[in-house]
Image: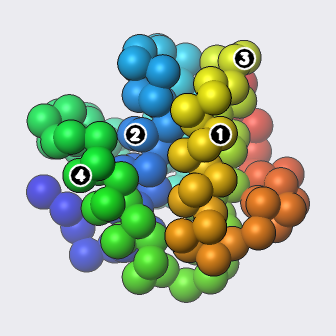
Amino acid sequence: MLTNNHFNNGLLFLSYLIIAADGVIDETEVDALKKICQYEGISLDYLDNFIRYAKVLSEKEVYNKGLEEISMCEDEEKLRAFGWLYRISEVDGTVHVKEIRFLIYSLKKAGIDFEDIISEKDKLPALF
């Protein structure tokens, strides 16, 4: 199911966690993820297949696979991925507490400062 592109895999795993964090996969969040995929050159067919794959995994499995994939990325790719995650968390108008905890904990694990993510997300196009 996964490709050998660690950035794409990590971005999708962690994005999936953000959009599913509040227990509801909101259509606005899915549309935002589609925009990210278009921007990053990830086919929408691959996204659809990925979502079907991720739905059968536990939250912990998705999280661990996402961090594993992101850990194999260059620092610039890690920043960009977390910038996108921050953008996704804003898209439905409500940043869920679980989304924030997930972001902060994941940043720690990846060795990235929150301030760097704020700067990076401002370089990325808006999703709504």
Q: Is 65 in front, or is 121?
A: 65
Sooner in the amino-acid sequence: mark 3 or mark 4: 4
Residue count near mark 1 (Cα–Cα under 10 Å), binned few <14, some 14–19, many ≥20: some
User: Is 115 on the left or on the right of 70, as rendered?
Assistant: right
**Residue at numbered disc 1:** 100
Secondary structure beneath disc 2?
helix
**Residue at numbered disc 3:** 93
CA gap between label 2 and label 4 equals 12 Å
Q: Is 26 in front, or is 34?
A: 26
Q: Are marks 3 and 2 in contact (CB under 8 Å)?
A: no
CA gap between label 2 and label 1 equals 14 Å
Is 120 located above or below residue 25 in the figure? below
**Residue at numbered disc 2:** 16
Q: Nearer the viewer, mark 3 or mark 4?
A: 4
Residue count near mark 3 (Cα–Cα under 10 Å), binned few <14, some 14–19, many ≥20: few
Q: Is 10 in front, or is 41?
A: 10
**Kind of residue at disc 1:** Ile
Residue count near mark 2 (Cα–Cα under 10 Å), binned few <14, some 14–19, many ≥20: many
**Residue ID at (61%, 49%):** 103
